[in-house]
Amino acid sequence: MNAPLLTLNDGHPLPWIGFGTYPLRGSAGHVAVRAALDSGFRLLDAAANYRNEVEVGRAVREFLTETRIPRDEIFVQTKVPGGRHDYDDAIEACDDSLALLGLDRIDVVLLHAPDPATDAYRDAWRALVDLRARGVVRSLGVSNVTAQQLATIVADSGVVPAVGQVAMDPYSQQHPMRSEFARLGIVTQSWSPLGGATPALAEPAVAGAAAAHGVTPAQVVLRWHLQQRSVPLPMSTEFAQQREFLDVFRFALTDAEFAGISALGRDVP
């Protein structure tokens, strides 16, 4: 089962759900990423800071060779870390990522967690724009940025990111950044969409919706993300659970169920 595709503001497609790869590393990480591809995931979220680009790239190359699925059907994204946010270093960081992945291009590159004590991220964004023009990168995005940082790079470059990543779950719903992303036509991606160690899955609003639809609480929360046009990036090392995560397009939450989960938010709307 594969996820349907959305269209980014740069005209390129992207799946409506992706596979998070943190903290997967080493042989176990490679096995888990390959299982995710076998289960039907077509969007993989890696990062230089995760130190798993080798494993992600290896899994993708093996999968493409063995299945003969076209490269254009697999979407690999990675991130330029905050410590490499000047022009030349950002160029080198992307070159390093491309070499580690062993792929022909990077589908999405995200400016990752800029240091608030410096404005070097402005030069890093300019570097990513130039790499896109060279065809090394297809789409650009940001991860863990502030509204001011976002406004600055857009004003500097005239280039609006296609993707904006935030940590989002039923307790932390990121209303201000999501509103800004929506205003600019940026697709929100949610990392840690199930809330990590938080007890969101046990909340009555989630458990009740799961029972009503005959699905798991995790599926309900992922569906809640989708119904507000947020692309969730769940992670699991278990093939069966990976398949479960993808099986969220055959049901829809009612307005009341959606509102009940949204009411769990602990941040300010």
Image (cartoon, grey):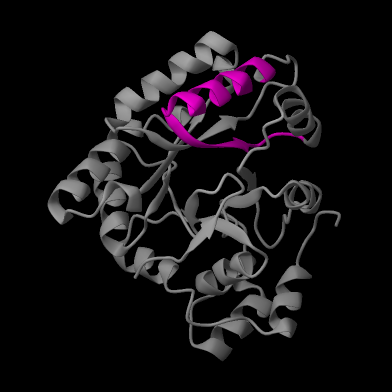
> In the displayed structure, would residue 66 be above or below residue 107?
below
Q: Is any part of residue 27 visible from this angle?
A: no
**In the image, residue 219 lies in the stretch drawn in magenta:** no
Q: Position of residue 32 (x, y in %)?
A: 29, 50
Quadrant assignment for the C terminus = bottom right
Would you identify the image quadrant in which residue 23 lies?
Answer: top left
**In the image, residue 142 lies in the stretch drawn in magenta:** yes
**In the image, what residue occupies the spot 63% across and 29% down?**
113
**In the image, what residue occupies the spot 17% across and 56% down?**
67
Q: Position of residue 43 (x, y in %)?
A: 41, 51
> In the displayed structure, would residue 234 be above or below residue 113?
below
Q: Position of residue 250 (x, y in %)?
A: 47, 81
Outermost residue on the bottom side: it is: 212
**In the image, what residue occupies the spot 65% across and 45% down?**
166
138 left or right, relative to 198: left
61 left or right, relative to 261: left
Give the magenta-colored segment's residue range. Answer: 122-146
Quadrant assignment for the N terminus = bottom left
Would you identify the image quadrant in which residue 145 lies?
Answer: top right
